Every structure is written in structure tokens, then in C-alpha cells.
Image: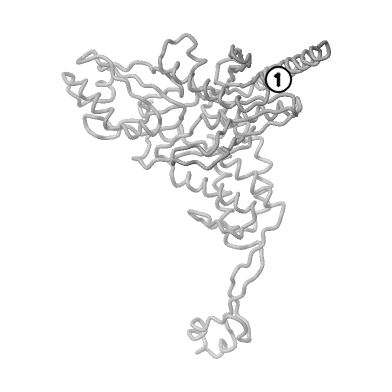
Amino acid sequence: MDKIFLEIECLTEQSKQLNAEYLRKNWFKKADKRYISQYLQKFVEYNKKYFDFLGVTSIIKGTDQRVSLKFKSSEFIGVIPLRSPDTGKQIGDFIVSPRYSSKDKLLEYIKILNLTNKAVNTEFKQSIPLISGRNFQPPFYYEAVIFIKKIEKLIRKRWLKFDQTEKNIKTPQGQVNWDKYIHNEFKVENRLKFPVRKNILSEFHTEYSNLKFVFDLCKNELLSPSTPEEIKLALKPKLFFIQEKLCFHKSIETEKMQIRQSDPILIKEIKIQANKLLQKEFSKSIAWRVDFNDVFEKYIQYLFEQVSKEFGGKFYSNFKIHRANYPKYAWELKYLEPDGVFRKGNTFTVFVDAKYKSHLLNKFSQSEELKNEYRKDLHQIISYTSFSDKDTKYGFLCYPSNVVESKEIKFKNSLNHNETIVSLLGIPLDTNVILNVKELIFEKLNLIEKTVQNNVYKVLENKWLS
């Protein structure tokens, strides 16, 4: 579409090449072809803050008429607007889409977040309005699903609050609105009509009406053509149930729900989610991004939690390993935080770290950057495994992949014969292969358990023989 400058997937090492002639004919129409390389430099500088926001690196190759432009993307998905270097006017939007998805760019993403039942933050940046319309808006309907689930819980309870109302009574009891009374008392029939303010405990208060407004936004979004059919069909019964329960509540527009310390936990959660939706509603058509590293981490945690229920043992998400003494310098770490720790009694412990990086998508690349990033990831998981109390230490390093795969890396210390075994797991962001992934993790854990038990038997046997 002519409103989209370029669309690439996240974790793309190099996009397709945009040569100077193509850019001049289609996007920089007033640029002088003799100085096209300068225009490309100017284009990158003009849009640097937006490229940085989306984690996109611009690569200019060649000189003069043979110059071309490529892009490299990171773990972020989102959309940014771009300006032309020749006129300074907006020319189109730059899109970074999820790497693993169905035809609907965000459907697989929504399925994964629905499975994990955890929210992922969408970040916005003030910008000129996007011109690609609803082609690739932030995943509003996912946030709407979370709100629907929470408000359904609220409806099954009663949320009563004191609401101030004003009624005319025959005696001046309570808080009388004397200003209003003075304006009307000159009429004989109004002499004994006192406008009195009263606090009434009721469900029909202003904040409930504000939530009704947010619900209406969600309902319209979830029933719109932009929402995938399978999500729409699954939610229709809930939407109609909630609509029926809220039919006597009037809808009052608001830009933000006020969160109070006195609010119950459920009310706070609903208000926080409502504010996210209101922010998106009033922040439509500006630059936005989602960190897919966060999505991948939550997905890996979900998979290990599910496997731990079947395998036995306990999985700890974002387990913190605190330092024993107080940090002396401002830049010191107060704790280490692996993405997860699986522990089965006193038998064995496995540390898990998820990295949304392109290593398993570029297995035979000689890129120094990939080597350096892998070295950091490997050192990190090995540092976590050092906290295991066993001679042989285990860790899982998870990367995104096109297929379910695994590879073992074994390190052995010749001084004390201690071993560290790191399993490199390739996990696709695809809900259709969840069973295969769970089977792989189960097999790996089962193999570790058998190995540990065999080692224990050998030690006991040697002690008995000696």
C-alpha cells in the first residue's frame, strides 16, 4: 500500500534493499538524483528518533547513484511515521510486525497472551499521526479481552458506593442547598421544598457509569471486523451477559479512572486496565511499540509452568537471587533474576533463561554481533547455574526458532570435574506446536532426573564397595 513505506518482521538481520532510483521515484520525488546519497543521509537523520524508538537500524551502502538503503530490526514490533528528506512532509509509515504469526499479523500474539493470562505493556511516543490507518494498530482487542474478564468478575459481586444525590423534602434536614432554595422560595408552593443533599449507598454511582463507558468501547472493538472471528465468537456470550447486567447503568465518558488507596484489589485492577484502554483510545494513530522479548519470556514461563504440573516439582518465575551484603556502589546489582527456576525437591535444579534473539534463524551466519550476544547469553545462564548445590549443573537457554529443536552444550572443569550442561532450546511462537514443545521440555527434565538418580546410585555403590 502507498501509505506504508516498508514492512519488515522483528529480528530481521537485513531487510530487502531499497535502491536510490526506487526511493526517488516512489518516495523522494522532489529529490535531485545527482545528490541522492545526501538525501538518504538526511532521511536517516530526520527520522532517527523514531527509528531508535522502534529499535530499527538504518544501513546505507554504496555512493552516488549506486547508493541503497537497508534496515535491521530488533525485538520490538510497532509502527512509526516517516518524513521525506526533500520536503520534510510525512510520506508513509514504517511497520515492524511479529515474526511468527498467522495471516492476521497479531492473532498468534493475542493467542499467546491469552494463554499466559499476563499483560504486556504497549509504549507510545508523541508523533505526527500515522497515515496507515487501521492496517496495523496496537492490539486494542487484547487489552479489551482482559478488561472484559475483570469486569465479569465484578458483576458477579456487588460494588456499592455512596453517591451524592439531591432531593426536595418538606423539612430542612441534612445538607440543604440554601442558594438553590433562595432562588425558588419566592413562590408560595416552593416554601416547603428544601433541596437536600443525601449520600445514598448504591450500585448506580459515577465510577460504575465510567466503567460502562469503557465497556462500550471494548464491546464495539471486539465486535468490529478488525477482531479475529475466533476471538469474537468466544467472547460474544460474555459481552451479551455483561451488557444485560449493565443495562440500567448509564454510560458517562471519562479520560481517566481515578485509583484510590481505599479501592478493593479487584477495583484497582479494573481501573488500571480501564486506563490502559482509555490511553489507547486517545493515543490512536501515534507511534507505538511492544517489546516481544517480554512476550517470549512470558510464553516460556507459561510452558515450563504447565510442564511442572505434569512432571512434578515447582517452577519459580522471575526468581530473585539476592546479594548477601548491601551494595556499596550505585551501579552494583542488588540481585540476579533468571526468567525461571525449576526445582524438584532436593533431586535437581534447572535454571531457565529466555532470549528473543535471531541466533537460531541465522545458524550459519559469521556475524560478530551474533557471536558476542551468544557469549553474553551463555555466560549469563552459566552464572545462574552456579547457584545449584550439585556437582553437575543444568540450564536451559531458550531462543525463538522456526521449528521445535534442541542442542546440548557441555562444559567440564578439569580441575574439580564439575560439569555444566546447557540445553539450547528452539521454541516457535506458535500455539499449534505447544504440545511438541511441552513434550521436548518433559523429555529433557526426565533425562536430567534419570542422570541425577544414576549418579547417586553410583556414589552409594562405591561407598558400599569401599
Q: Is residue 300 left or right of residue 27?
A: right
Q: How many marks?
A: 1
At 24% from the left edge and 34% from the top edge, which residue is drawn? 88
Q: Is residue 48 left or right of residue 314?
A: left
Q: Is residue 92 left or right of residue 284?
A: left
Q: Residue pushed farthest top?
A: 364
List the residue tagged with mark 1: 445
Horizontal and vertical percent position of residue 93 = 37, 31
Q: Nearer the viewer, residue 448 or 126?
A: 448
Which corner quadrant of the image does residue 224 belong to? top right
Horizontal and vertical percent position of residue 395 = 62, 22
- Residue type at mark 1? Leu
Task: Tell me the quarter of the image containing the C terminus.
Answer: top right
Q: Looking at the picture, does residue 232 appear above or below residue 104? A: below
Q: Looking at the picture, does residue 333 appear above or below residue 399? A: below
Q: Nearer the viewer, residue 189 or 96?
A: 96
Q: Nearer the viewer, residue 398 or 437?
A: 398
Which corner quadrant of the image does residue 458 belong to? top right
Q: Nearer the viewer, residue 458 or 430?
A: 458
Asked which secondary structure carries label 1, the reply is helix
Which corner quadrant of the image does residue 457 belong to? top right
At 46% from the left edge and 30% from the top edge, which residue is drawn? 77
Horizontal and vertical percent position of residue 223 = 58, 39
Horizontal and vertical percent position of residue 110 = 58, 32
- Label 1 CA crowd tier, 10 Å (few <14, some 14–19, many 20+): many
Q: Is residue 203 left or right of residue 49?
A: right
At 51% from the left edge and 29% from the top edge, which residue is drawn? 293
At 67% from the left edge and 47% from the top edge, which residue is drawn? 152
Q: Looking at the picture, does residue 197 appear above or below residue 351? A: below
